Amino acid sequence: MRKEANIKLNCLLHGADYNPEQWLDTPEVLEEDIRLMQQAGINCVSVGIFSWTALEPAEGVYTFQWLDQVIEHLYENGIYTVLATPSGAKPGWMAKKYPEILRVEADRRRNLQGGRHNHCYTSPVYREMVTRMNTRLARRYAHHPGVILWHVSNEIQGECHCPLCQAAFRSWLKEKYGSLEKLNKAYWTAFWSHTYTDWEEIESPAPQGETNVHGLVLDWRRFCTAQTVDFFRVETAPLRAENPEIPVTMNMMGFYDGIDYWQFLPELDIISWDSYPGWHNGDGNEGGNAVWNGAYCDAMRAMKHKPWLLMENSPSTTNWIGASRHKRPGFHRLTAIQNLAHGSDSIQYFQWRQSRGSCEKFHSAVVSHNSSPEVRIFREVAGVGAMLKKLKEIRGSHVPAKAAIIYDVQNGWAIGESKGPRNIGEGYLDLILRIYEGFWRRGIPVDLVHMDAPLDGYRFVAAPMLYMLRGDIAQRLRRFAEQGGTLLTSYLTGLVDETDLCYLGQTPACGLTEVLGLWAEEIDGLWDHQHNGIVMQDAPGMQNRYEASRLCEVVHPTTAETLGVYESDYYQGMPAVTVNRFGKGRVYYVGTFGESQFYYDLLGRIAPEAGLSPALDTELPYGVTVGIRQSDTKTYYFLQNFNKDSRELVLPFTLEDLETGGVYTGTITLAGYEGMVCARAKEA
């Protein structure tokens, strides 16, 4: 197994995407950048992300001198380089000379040059071009003391349907299935007479072609992931060959499901992602957006169960959403604390300096068009830089999560293609976030893991809408419960296998009916304006009634105990919430989409049973949460108020602010949008 590299810096990274190639004709700007970076507490920048034309203006003509000077000048001034490979945006000369590298869309139209990620991952020409460039980058910079990390491409995404990819897809299917007979059986192609009689008949899904064979649709997405991983492996090979001590990362995107990021894990040394919640899109209280952001942070952390890097976030506003709302005063500091609380060892931005033109010229940056360090955004970024210096001791500490939620991209693909029972949105991610919110509101740390992830070490696992049973997940959930774990399940569980073939007989399939202590008969899809209710029975600590919507599953208990029933319709009085004792554990089932308060109350009942502890054992006001990280010798508490107004918090013990040295005991008041990082104060 390849030894993983690590960044050998004893500090939290504070940086930004830096595009000096846009300013080569104004060297005074580059000089000013160094001065402002030092003033803002910037200790690293990502360079070269979209620099291919500046590095190779014509085939075989390399102009690295400007990059030499930038990296050296940064290093001389105490600023490290996260060096990117430029494959995310190829130069125009390459597309003109080698049109095969241009991506083909699902409707079989070949793209023109433009945009980014407009290249074919299969093309031997593009792979060779990337290898040549990366080999030169590695030989020139892989041993420079200022280069600390490889930033491979940028927000890798998309798919290509060109003839090269079609041939590669067929080869991938041949290797997976071995014969057309097995493939046809797995895809159930006798439906509508879609049986394949020759491998050459198979093509990727197309709007004017095949989209109704769900096994094909799923396998195409799996192939696109596999092909992208293979391209990534080719791209990183020269980097690792030159200096395996420099770690490799790729910046992922929040809940992007175009490819299955989890398949990249063997190729990555460090996990990183770009965080862009829609802050300030409501009434000013940001709990909902904070839940979204926190959940994906926890997915990133759970990939390797190690600290990760926030590669991009906006210092204020983004320019590609419906309304460009600025982060309110103090809010940027709060979001930085949130990311640190969920395991990040960096706060980095897009972008350092605003571009003068093109599509991101009004996306906020640390340095705006007026270049002044006196503007609010710059001052707040500088404040975060100062904070990170004082918090450097938290670097490398871990989040002690004993609860997990299974979030599986491939399962999400299958649900999205299921064609029923609710084609206006089954809400897979919505349910995951609703369950997650119940933990977030209580300050209980949780991991988001994929279906193949080990479950060892967790006391609680939620497996919502586990529609597709892939691999041995059913057996592992059974073993988890038998050995004393607490499991939470839901409607739409265990209906199909990995090629979307429905299981015959009782469901949930693969022995899960015994684990849940019930079997499912049918499921009712509700329109958005239709609702039912959950009427709780013997469930201390919970309300009498909760609203239910979207989907209502009709089940028949065998050994499960009923905790709540449906309020109305023909299944009135039938079980909506159950619990089953299985082995040494408990298995909860919820048959409908409950309101937020339902999951908060249900998890309040479950957490003590499962041995889950909050970061602080105290009642948290709505919109306030507390994160936790631990080192070998210390526990850190991250207090966060996502309300625009102040909230009071009763402390179970005395805390010391790591920035100011202030000591808090009894009750603490968090101002609107305030966050702080504390440790337990030493007893007098």
Image (spheres, rainbow, N blue to C red):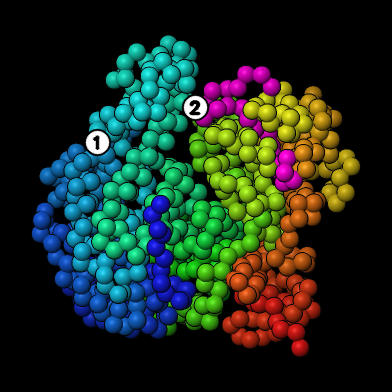
Q: Magenta segment range?
A: 481-506
> Compared to 205, does 402 lie above or below?
below
The spot of residue 62 in percent (x, y) is 13, 62
Residue drawn at 68 percent across, 34 percent down = 491
Chief SS of the magenta region: loop
Q: Nearer the viewer, residue 299 or 396?
A: 396
Identify the mark at residue 499; answer none if there is no mark: 2
In this view, which residue lies farthest toward the front? 1
Q: Report if residue 493 lies within the magenta region.
A: yes
> Compared to 479, does 50 lie above or below?
below
Q: Provide the secondary structure element on which disc 2 rests.
A: loop
> Compared to 4, does 42 lie above or below?
below
- The quarter of the displayed image where residue 21 is located: bottom left
Q: Report if residue 173 lies within the magenta region.
A: no
Residue type, label 2:
Thr
The spot of residue 145 in percent (x, y) is 30, 75
Tell me: 419 left or right of 146: right
Residue type, label 1:
Arg
Residue drawn at 61 percent across, 81 percent down = 658
Sequence-first disc among 1 and 2: 1
Classed neighbour count for the residue bearing mark 2: other residues with Cα under 10 Å, few (<14), some (14–19), many (≥20): many
Residue drawn at 51 percent across, 53 percent down = 303
Tell me: 587 left or right of 312: right
Identify the mark at residue 110; answer none if there is no mark: 1
* Quadrant including the C terminus: bottom right
The spot of residue 469 in percent (x, y) is 58, 32
Residue 284 visible, this angle: no
Q: Provide the secondary structure element on which disc 1 rests.
A: loop
